[in-house]
Image: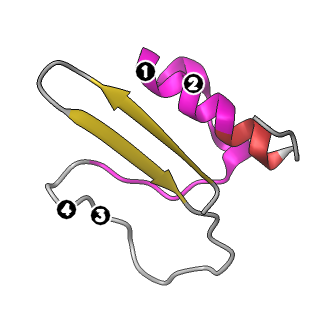
Amino acid sequence: MLTTTQHHFAERQLAFYFFLVVQQYGTTPCGNKGQPVLWCPQQALNVEEFPRLRVAIIRQLMANRSGAVS
């Protein structure tokens, strides 16, 4: 596992688990409930394109990519 993060809201708690994928998969990713999902290299992530709560996650993933400890 690469990293985890949690968000706590009044009505629910969300936990995100990130894994480093080292193999290429021949299938197209899909969300369990029809939400959009995309495989992309970390360097292709652009924080300006994501909702505010996800920016911290993306920054943490980028730090892990460079070998930094968060």
- Between the C-alphas of marks 1 and 2, the distance is 6 Å
Between disc 4 and disc 2, whose residue precedes?
Answer: 4
For the residue carrying disc 2, how many other residues have a C-alpha within 10 Å: few (<14), some (14-19), or many (20+)? few
Q: Are marks 1 and 2 in contact (CB under 8 Å)?
A: yes
Q: Nearer the viewer, mark 4 or mark 2?
A: 2
Q: Secondary structure at mark 2?
A: helix
Please provide percent x and percent y for residue 26: 48, 84
Which residue is tagged 2?
Answer: 56
Q: Is residue 47 magenta?
A: yes
Which residue is tagged 3?
Answer: 30
For the residue carrying disc 3, how many other residues have a C-alpha within 10 Å: few (<14), some (14-19), or many (20+)? few
In this picture, residue 52 sits left or right of residue 61: left
Which residue is tagged 1?
Answer: 53
Of residues 63 and 33, which is closer to you in this image? 63
Q: Which residues are magenta?
A: 36-60
Q: Are marks 1 and 4 in contact (CB under 8 Å)?
A: no
Please provide percent x and percent y for residue 67: 88, 47
Above/below status of 52 relative to 50: above
Between disc 3 and disc 2, whose residue precedes?
Answer: 3
- Between the C-alphas of marks 4 and 3, the distance is 7 Å
Report the predominant secondary structure element of the magenta stretch: helix
Which residue is tagged 4?
Answer: 32
